Image: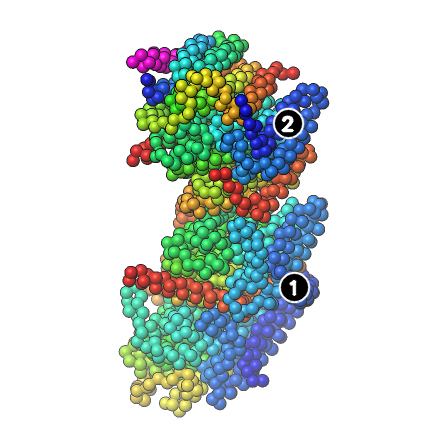
């Protein structure tokens, strides 16, 4: 039997990621070196190489199952950037946290590979597997501080709820399959265009929505997020708040824009509800938090709500806005987490009191990130929100934007509280910081990007990353 | 020297002000030189100008465009006609004398240079007021004299009462200006100009137009006239805005003489006279002016009867005399009004300066009940004061007689309203004579009623004070001679002089009637003097007896009809109460701030509530997810079914 | 009769004035030469004026912490240079055209059709000049008052200056919004870090209030973007006729932002807190320029973009303005805090401004613009003055003052001039502005004009009351005035006095700048209203 | 009729077994009942002509996964388990939620409209044998998911090691 | 012939029983078992669909699901073990350290 070798060009990035990761796992065993920094450096190198390769590896392969197009490439950039930044802020931190295993970097790499597969998959089966690849890695990462009960708790909650949600996803996929005899999203779309909408299909779609909403931590499927973000090591939290969320959006875009295109009316209505609820829950609960990581968790829930507006718009413009938003969010959120990591004690919001007196530069950077998260120009956060709002308004969802804007104003309150603590409250105790070049680099990159995108948004916006249709 | 001459009239005092306020500190005690020279310059120029005007020249000259906004164009400019010329003379001459007087009076005061610079500023403002050729510049001067009045009333700012009085004067005037300002707007809206010449040229177009206010059709002319009159009421301390003038006596006495007797307070009369074409077009407005003047004059005169503060009595007398002037204007006798303004300036300034001289001797004592017999110690003051009192009382031959008599005669001629105000005017003449001589008798006659130290301190004032007194005394005697009625062999020069601006009222009474009017007023005045003599020289027990007999009337008069209290309880306190209780306490404090702080609090409260849902209990999270699934399913299915 | 001699207190300022006067020719010469120089060389004026302070503000952060004096001097130098650089605007401005001048257009974000587009016309030019001037004074007044985090303070001031000027010059809505919001950051810090005891509350209140308003405007901007054929170009928007209902909605969306900034009646409560708690320089900027941005927004955007809506909504705006005038004035009577009183007086004065603007006639709008400048000068000056005395006494309670005129006569004179300007005495700038506004307001709606006039009465009431309590009466034993104004403070206040009187006696110098532009604005309102009527008639016929 | 009866038997047994599994107090019992359930499900697979799946079900689930479960259960101390509550306090809510969702799905299944028929008829599969047919599809069309699945298993190994390793 | 709906109904019922088990049991192991139950239910429906649609994709997916289920079980139990080492609990209501 003659089995032709499929075209591997489009999938080279993922292949490289996987191979390097496997190699790392092997090499790590034989290295007696005390620090495992070099593993991280290899990962960054790989990630950079992959980023370099992505634009060259466009195409469709594996019988239309795997698509590398502008859309997926952009998302892969986001994943890789978040990976690089995460590794940069992890170096000394995981030593401090006593969680330095060689597997740490491998798991980050695997998770990223999973996300990349998710972004590229045009088949629900591949999508499911990519999702599980990512999810299983992240479950482990959440619990990698295995001697810490909080980390255990985070991992357990994340795992159980994640498994629950993927079971729901599977149920949805199986129903979809039953109704269309297909798992390829393009074929599903084609089939759905012909027939009329059945209620079963709606149920299937709703189940898929719920599962994806879990991944992007959209209310009411968000409840894992605060606990997991709080319990997981901070560097992993930073990764969680960007990577898996972006991956969730990648698949939401792919699945709903293509497979369920004919049901757009329905999923838009559902997503509007989810988006508003998400923004409400994220912003309102963030206000009452006293733990920094937890507050950032709710903030990231809120941001998922804003990003959903782009999906709701239902246009290419909206989708591009979401992508830009997530990229910008990656920088500003990573920056904020980098500062949490920089501090010896950065978990409690009170730890930031009077930071501007002891470490003015750190405080100033945190200020920039906080304003960016609020969405105040000339920071990148504003461009992201503006972009999303433009898309949503253009699609006619002005009232949703007005709601979003109101919640955005609420969000200013808790971000400003951090600024307030840093600049306007008296110092309680001299904050100790652990500066190191890698963390510094991560901060510098984030800061620069926040400003560059804020002032010259042309570097990220205006390109249209069309999906392969 | 063409037009610059006229510009220099107000400008010289301004320059004097600028120099003194900036550099006065360097030469403290010599500050008066600059001020006096500046005013002297103005005075000389005014006289020259007056002579030019006498020759028939009328100057209307724009210096520069002040405000241009669309069709709203106003200049800083000068209109010098007969009316202005008279005012120039009054203002600069009295001002000059008061300046000189102040050298002695204010000697040794810590704010000596400051006082003179204020006086200069006032002279500048008053000159701007009278020389302006448009309403806006009038308004400028109007407010600026008010400001100087504020400064000078509150000159002894360390004293609570002085500071309060200055503030009160300013704010009460603002009430008048409120109407005045609206009047200005109305003029502009309907005539599209604020320049006098254009206004008077187009004023006939307003005839017959009406405006609807709260359902009442009101003649436009009447409305505008009355609104402008509001300003006059405030500035000239007429009812119901008279309350500030008595308190204004907290200022140094020269100030009272200059601002609160001779010049500033007469600005209202000047305004009405200036707008005589407008007022004359509305009978209603005229009637209001006349009655306001008459009632005020009576009202103030009655208060003056019982007061003991020498300056306050003179102040109420001023209010009363200003009422007289309005009375004149109201019956169309603008010339007579201005004539009275002219004479009043001298005798009233003299009264004040005389009172100042007395105070100087009495070390600030103001209560006439504690004086007495000063005639012996300060003869010049006594005689000049006496002349002024005789003049104001309207004894024939002196200034006051001629102007007052003309007013009464013209009022007598002006229909029903005229008769009414004539009666009031005549009564007031008697009251005036009474209270003027009450001061004279209590102060200069009898025995000294003060303490021994005070008596020891009594002395005549320095020559810088007495010389102006004497000059003013000359004015108080002779100022009236420019308006001797034909009946008494004169020609009423001033009346004819002002005719081009103010017109001349129609007189249809007979000579006999005119004789009668004169006779009645003279008899009443003499009666007033006689009564005063009886009560305060020959039978000093009577006043107390009367006071006890008519206790309630006495109390009302002593408390100035309780007008201050009325305003306090109806305007000042309610406004403050609304400010502090309603606005700060309720609207801002409870409602707006309640919402502003309440919404975040509510959101945080929500947060605290919803936070409880995040129990940390795994199953609850899963149930949340299941519940979300359930809700979405149910909503979508219900929606699809429909 | 005469109060006691206290020549000692009187003698002391003599030297100060004498010495100060020596500086005046130097300053005049400096400005004169600077003007000559800046007019001669060619440069993009607006960009320089905006970005010199902004870049300078960032550079100041690089100065080592211990060199406080260097930070002060640098910021003074930068503000001075910015002022000099802005002078060509005044000198070279063509008063005969309503077109934008000194325009700079570059592509910025082509994807959204956003341009870096700057320019000034008669409406905005004065605000640029006012901003550059007041910034200098903000630096000098804080010279000794700020001793902590000096470079951050001056950096913030410079950042605010640049952004404010940016707001007034932007001809692209996106650019406008960037500057509009960007200014919040340094302002928030300024109030929150160097402010009074209740500063944190005030800062966050200011921030949230403004943010809520601006965000609604943001939605409005985006909506109008799509109605303008995807363009943020303000000039293009001005030539677009939006459907009437859209105009109404957008008008209110913009209202949210501008009314909060002004602040108009129901949304004014951030202002007393922010003004009161901010450091002197912050109050000056807030009162002097920042709150003008709201009224400027009405003029630049709300009215020309949505003329029919503006015309239809003018009665509501006028009523709100009149409420603000009276409300702000009456509430002043109940204040016990020096800065709070002046802050509430701003509410009243800005009520006049909006009244004038929505009178929608020449006098009203010109008066409104002039009054904004006046209010900037006068209230700025009042806050500067309060700052000067606060530095000595460290109290804001009016009851703790009294008799300051005895101890600080020169200062008292300055304060008196500003007080008088504030209550609109003729001869000061305040009079011209208020007169024109009231005239315009009266022409538009007589009753409201009359009611607005009452604000002037009450205005005199509270300002004179304040003046009396602080300066008159016997010296309060609790207040330690130490000494009269020194040279630096004298020179800080002097330019404002000059402006007060200059505008008071020769307002045409400024009115002539705006005449043509305002006429254009009024034409826009009237013509489009005409069109609307025609349209309605056509619809009826159909 | 016979197929229906047989299906009925298996259906009832699987449902009952499921209920039993989730209600046992002792996890060991649950796991053992699970074993029975897996066999029944495997039987249904056979019924549906999926022999290979049935085999995988038995080998992998029954053989590997359940053994893993048992290992872990034995590691943990179960004494406490037997004496404590088995359900959470709010169990009725959970049940109600589950049942209402079930209701919705029931409601929709009645209107199930299956997709178009594919090419793998029963005859074709029987001709090729099930295993081979699956293998062909798996190793050609689904080779990429297959590789990804291998990564997942790798992660499972790594993860289990990282997490369950004793502290060094 | 048994109709497809019967299989799907059966699968749904088992799935929901799994859901209910997950929602109401305190014991983490039983929750894991409930998840396995849910996955089995999905498998059942997939195989049924596959059979009735004459298409093998469903069965391919089943194989992957089984693989993933095994991996999940391994990781889940590993997490449980590491938790048990630190805290000696297997009940969800004992692990509520983080909340709010």
Looking at the image, which is closer to me, C298 or B112? C298
Magenta region, residue range: D1-25
Q: Are marks 2 and 1 in contact (CB under 8 Å)?
A: no
Q: How is the image coloured?
A: rainbow
Q: Is residue D66 left or right of residue C148?
A: left
Q: Which residue is identified by label 1?
A: C42
On what subunit does the disc labeled 1 rest?
C
Residue in view at x 52 percent, y 68 percent: C97
Crowding at mark 2 (Cα within 10 Å: few <14, some 14-19, many 20+): some
Q: Is residue C417 magenta?
A: no
Residue in view at x 56 percent, y 85 percent: B2
Looking at the image, which is closer to me, A455 or B517? A455
Crowding at mark 1 (Cα within 10 Å: few <14, some 14-19, many 20+): few
Residue D80: x and y, percent?
A: 48, 10
Q: Which mark is residue A20?
A: 2
Residue B438's quadrant in the figure? bottom left
Q: Is residue A58 left or right of residue B552?
A: right
* Distance from the alpha carbon under mark 2 to that under mark 1: 59 Å
Are the residues flagged by discs 2 and 1 from a single subunit?
no
Q: Secondary structure at mark 1?
A: loop
């Amino acid at each position: 039997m003659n089995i032709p070798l499929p075209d591997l060009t489009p999938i080279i990035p993922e292949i490289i990621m996987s191979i390097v990761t496997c190699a790392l796992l092997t090499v790590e065993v034989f290295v007696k070196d005390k620090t495992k920094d070099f593993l991280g450096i290899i990962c960054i190198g790989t990630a950079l190489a992959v980023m370099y390769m992505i634009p060259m590896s466009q195409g469709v392969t594996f019988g239309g199952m795997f698509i590398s197009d502008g859309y997926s490439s952009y998302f892969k950039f986001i994943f890789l950037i978040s990976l690089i930044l995460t590794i940069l802020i992890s170096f000394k931190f995981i030593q401090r946290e006593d969680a330095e295993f060689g597997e740490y970097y491998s798991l980050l790499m695997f998770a990223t590979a999973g996300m990349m597969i998710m972004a590229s998959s045009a088949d629900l089966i591949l999508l499911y597997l990519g999702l599980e690849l990512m999810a299983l890695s992240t479950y482990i990462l959440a619990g990698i501080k295995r001697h810490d009960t909080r980390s255990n708790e985070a991992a357990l909650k994340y795992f159980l709820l994640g498994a629950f949600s993927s079971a729901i996803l599977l149920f949805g996929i199986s129903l979809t399959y039953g109704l269309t005899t297909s798992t390829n999203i393009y074929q599903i779309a084609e089939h759905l265009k012909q027939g009329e909408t059945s209620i079963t299909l709606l149920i299937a779609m709703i189940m898929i929505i719920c599962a994806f909403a879990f991944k992007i931590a959209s209310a009411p499927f968000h409840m894992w997020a605060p606990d997991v973000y709080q319990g997981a090591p901070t560097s992993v939290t930073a990764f969680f708040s960007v990577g898996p969320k972006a991956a969730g959006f990648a698949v939401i875009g792919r699945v709903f824009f293509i497979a369920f295109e004919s049901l757009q009316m329905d999923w838009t209505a559902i997503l509007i509800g989810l988006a508003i609820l998400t923004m409400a829950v994220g912003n309102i609960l963030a206000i009452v938090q006293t733990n920094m990581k937890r507050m950032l968790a709710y903030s990231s829930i809120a941001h998922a709500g804003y990003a959903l507006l782009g999906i709701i718009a239902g246009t290419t413009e909206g989708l591009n806005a979401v992508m830009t938003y997530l990229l910008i969010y990656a920088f500003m959120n990573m920056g904020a987490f980098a500062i949490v990591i920089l501090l010896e004690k950065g978990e409690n919001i009170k730890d930031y009191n009077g930071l501007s007196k002891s470490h003015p530069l750190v405080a100033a950077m945190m200020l920039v990130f906080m304003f960016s998260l609020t969405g105040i120009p000339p920071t990148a956060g504003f461009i992201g929100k503006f972009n999303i709002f433009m898309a949503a308004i253009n699609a006619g969802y002005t009232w949703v934007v007005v709601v979003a804007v109101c919640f955005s104003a609420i969000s200013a309150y808790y971000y400003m509280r951090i600024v307030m603590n840093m600049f306007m409250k008296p110092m309680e105790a001299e904050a100790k910081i652990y500066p190191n070049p890698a963390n510094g680099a991560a901060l510098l990159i984030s800061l620069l990007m926040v400003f560059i995108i804020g002032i010259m948004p042309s570097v990220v916006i205006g390109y249209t990353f069309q999906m392969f249709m | 020297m063409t037009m610059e001459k006229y510009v220099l009239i107000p400008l010289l005092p301004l320059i004097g002000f600028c120099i003194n306020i900036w550099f006065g500190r360097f030469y403290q005690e010599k500050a008066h030189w600059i001020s006096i020279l500046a005013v002297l310059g103005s005075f000389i120029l005014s006289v020259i100008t007056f002579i030019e005007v006498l020759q028939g020249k009328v100057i209307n000259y724009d210096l520069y465009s002040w405000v241009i906004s669309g069709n709203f164009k106003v200049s800083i400019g000068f209109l010098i006609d007969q009316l202005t010329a008279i005012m120039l003379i009054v203002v600069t001459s009295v001002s000059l004398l008061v300046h000189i007087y102040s050298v002695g009076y204010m000697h040794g005061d810590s704010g000596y240079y400051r006082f003179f610079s204020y006086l200069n500023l006032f002279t500048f403002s008053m000159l701007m007021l009278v020389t302006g050729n448009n309403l806006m510049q009038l308004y400028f001067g109007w407010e600026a004299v008010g400001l100087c009045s504020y400064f000078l009333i509150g000159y002894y700012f360390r004293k609570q009462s002085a500071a309060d009085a200055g503030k009160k004067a300013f704010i009460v005037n603002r009430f008048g200006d409120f109407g005045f300002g609206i009047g200005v707007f109305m003029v502009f809206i309907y005539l599209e100009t604020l320049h006098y010449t254009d206004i008077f040229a187009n004023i006939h177009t307003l005839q017959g137009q009406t405006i609807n206010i709260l359902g009442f059709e009101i003649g436009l002319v009447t409305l505008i006239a009355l609104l402008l009159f509001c300003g006059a009421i405030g500035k000239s301390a007429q009812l119901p805005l008279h309350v500030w003038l008595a308190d204004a006596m907290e200022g140094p006495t020269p100030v009272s003489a200059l601002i609160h007797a001779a010049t500033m307070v007469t600005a209202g009369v000047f305004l009405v006279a200036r707008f005589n074409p407008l007022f004359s077009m509305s009978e209603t407005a005229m009637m209001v002016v006349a009655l306001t003047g008459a009632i005020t004059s009576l009202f103030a005169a009655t208060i003056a009867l019982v007061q003991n503060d020498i300056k306050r009595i003179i102040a109420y007398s001023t209010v009363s005399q200003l009422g007289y002037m309005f009375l004149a204007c109201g019956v169309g006798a603008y010339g007579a009004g201005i004539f009275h303004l002219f004479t009043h300036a001298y005798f009233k300034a003299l009264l004040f300066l005389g009172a100042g001289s007395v105070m100087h001797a009495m070390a600030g004592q103001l209560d006439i009940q504690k004086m007495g017999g000063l005639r012996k110690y300060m003869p010049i003051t006594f005689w000049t004061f006496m002349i002024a009192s005789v003049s104001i009382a309207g004894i024939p031959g002196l200034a006051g007689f001629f102007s007052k008599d003309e007013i009464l005669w013209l009022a007598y001629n002006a229909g029903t309203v005229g008769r009414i105000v004539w009666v009031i005017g005549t009564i007031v003449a008697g009251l005036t004579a009474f209270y003027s001589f009450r001061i004279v008798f209590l102060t200069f006659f009898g025995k000294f009623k003060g303490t021994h130290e005070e008596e020891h301190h009594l002395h005549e004032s320095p020559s810088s004070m007495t010389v102006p007194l004497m000059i003013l005394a000359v004015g108080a005697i002779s100022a009236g001679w420019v308006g001797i009625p034909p009946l008494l062999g004169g020609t009423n020069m001033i009346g004819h002089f002002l005719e081009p601006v103010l017109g001349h009222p129609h007189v249809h009474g007979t000579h006999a009637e005119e004789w009668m009017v004169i006779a009645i007023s003279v008899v009443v005045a003499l009666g007033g003097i006689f009564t005063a003599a009886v009560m305060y020289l020959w039978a000093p027990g009577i006043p107390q007896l009367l006071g006890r007999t008519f206790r309630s009337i006495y109390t009302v008069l002593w408390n100035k009809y309780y007008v201050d209290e009325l305003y306090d309880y109806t305007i000042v306190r309610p406004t403050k109460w609304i400010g502090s209780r309603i606005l700060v306490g309720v609207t801002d404090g409870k409602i707006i701030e309640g919402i502003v702080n309440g919404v975040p609090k509510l959101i945080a409260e929500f947060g605290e509530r919803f936070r409880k849902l995040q129990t940390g209990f795994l199953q609850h999270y899963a149930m949340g997810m299941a519940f979300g699934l359930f809700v979405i399913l149910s909503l979508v299915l219900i929606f699809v079914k429909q | 009769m005469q109060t006691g001699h206290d020549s000692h207190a009187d003698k002391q300022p003599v030297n100060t004035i004498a010495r100060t006067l020596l500086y005046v020719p130097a300053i005049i010469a400096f400005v004169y030469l600077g003007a000559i120089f800046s007019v001669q060389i060619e440069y993009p004026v607006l960009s320089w004026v905006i970005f010199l302070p902004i870049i300078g503000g960032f550079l100041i952060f690089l100065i080592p912490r211990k060199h406080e004096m260097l930070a002060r001097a640098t910021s003074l130098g930068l503000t001075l240079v910015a002022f000099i650089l802005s002078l060509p605007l005044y000198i070279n401005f063509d008063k005969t055209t309503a077109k934008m001048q000194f325009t700079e257009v570059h592509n910025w974000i082509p994807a959204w059709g956003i341009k870096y587009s700057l320019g000034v016309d008669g409406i905005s030019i004065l605000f640029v000049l006012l901003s550059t001037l007041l910034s200098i004074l903000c630096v000098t007044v804080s010279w000794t008052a700020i001793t902590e985090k000096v470079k951050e303070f001056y950096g913030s001031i410079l950042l605010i200056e640049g952004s404010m000027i940016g707001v007034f010059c932007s001809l692209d809505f996106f650019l406008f919004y960037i500057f509009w919001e960007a200014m919040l950051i340094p302002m928030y810090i300024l109030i929150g870090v160097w402010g009074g005891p209740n500063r944190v509350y005030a800062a966050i209140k200011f921030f949230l209030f403004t943010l809520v308003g601006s965000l609604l405007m943001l939605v409005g901007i985006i909506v109008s973007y799509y109605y303008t054929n995807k363009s943020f170009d303000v000039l293009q928007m001005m030539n677009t006729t939006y459907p009437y209902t859209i105009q109404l909605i957008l008008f209110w969306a913009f209202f949210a932002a501008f009314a909060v900034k002004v602040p108009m009646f129901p949304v004014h409560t951030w202002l007393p807190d922010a003004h009161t708690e901010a450091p002197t320089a912050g109050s000056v900027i807030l009162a002097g320029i920042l709150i003008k941005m709201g009224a400027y927004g009405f003029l630049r955007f709300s009215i020309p973009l949505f003329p029919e809506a503006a015309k239809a909504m003018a009665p509501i705006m006028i009523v709100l303005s009149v409420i603000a005038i009276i409300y702000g004035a009456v509430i002043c009577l109940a204040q016990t805090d020096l800065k709070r009183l002046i802050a509430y007086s701003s509410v009243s004065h800005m009520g006049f401004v909006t009244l004038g603007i929505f009178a929608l006639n020449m006098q009203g709008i010109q008066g409104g613009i002039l009054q904004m400048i006046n209010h900037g000068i006068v209230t700025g000056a009042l806050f500067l003055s309060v700052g000067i005395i606060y530095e000595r006494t460290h109290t804001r309670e009016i009851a703790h003052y009294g008799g300051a005129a005895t101890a600080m006569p020169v200062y008292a004179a300055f304060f008196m001039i500003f007080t008088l300007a504030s209550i609109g005495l003729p001869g000061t700038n305040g009079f011209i502005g208020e007169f024109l506004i009231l005239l315009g307001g009266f022409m538009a709606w007589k009753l409201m004009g009359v009611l607005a006039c009452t604000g002037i009465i009450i205005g005199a009431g509270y300002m004179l009351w304040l003046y009396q309590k602080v300066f008159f009466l016997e010296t309060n034993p609790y207040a330690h005035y130490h000494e009269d104004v020194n040279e630096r403070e004298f020179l800080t206040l002097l330019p404002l006095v000059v402006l007060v009187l200059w505008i008071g006696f020769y307002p045409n110098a400024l009115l002539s700048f705006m005449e043509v532009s305002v006429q254009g604005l009024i034409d826009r309102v009237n013509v489009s209203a005409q069109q609307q009527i025609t349209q309605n008639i056509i619809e009826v016929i159909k | 009729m016979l197929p229906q009866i047989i299906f009925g038997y298996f259906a009832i047994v699987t449902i009952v077994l499921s209920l039993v599994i989730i209600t046992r107090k002792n996890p060991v019992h649950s796991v053992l009942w699970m074993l029975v359930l897996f066999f029944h499900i495997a039987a249904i697979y056979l019924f549906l002509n999926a022999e290979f799946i049935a085999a995988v079900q038995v080998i992998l689930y029954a053989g590997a996964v359940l053994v893993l479960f048992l290992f872990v259960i034995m590691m943990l101390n179960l004494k406490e388990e037997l004496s404590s509550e088995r359900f959470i306090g709010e169990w009725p809510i959970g049940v109600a939620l589950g049942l209402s969702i079930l209701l919705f799905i029931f409601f929709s299944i009645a209107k199930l409209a299956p997709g178009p028929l594919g090419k793998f008829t029963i005859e074709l599969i029987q001709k090729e044998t099930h295993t081979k047919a699956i293998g062909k599809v798996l190793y050609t069309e689904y080779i990429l998911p297959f590789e990804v699945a291998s990564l997942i298993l790798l992660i499972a190994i790594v993860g289990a090691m990282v997490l369950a390793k004793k502290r060094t | 012939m048994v109709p497809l709906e019967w299989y799907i109904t059966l699968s749904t019922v088992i799935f929901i029983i799994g859901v209910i088990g997950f929602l109401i049991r305190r014991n983490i192991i039983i929750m894991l078992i409930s998840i396995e139950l849910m996955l089995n239910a999905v498998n059942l429906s997939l195989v049924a669909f596959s059979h009735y649609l004459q298409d093998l994709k469903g069965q391919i997916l089943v194989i992957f699901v089984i693989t993933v289920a095994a991996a999940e079980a391994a990781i889940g139990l590993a997490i449980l073990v590491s938790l048990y080492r630190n805290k000696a609990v297997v009940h969800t209501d004992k692990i509520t350290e983080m909340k709010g």
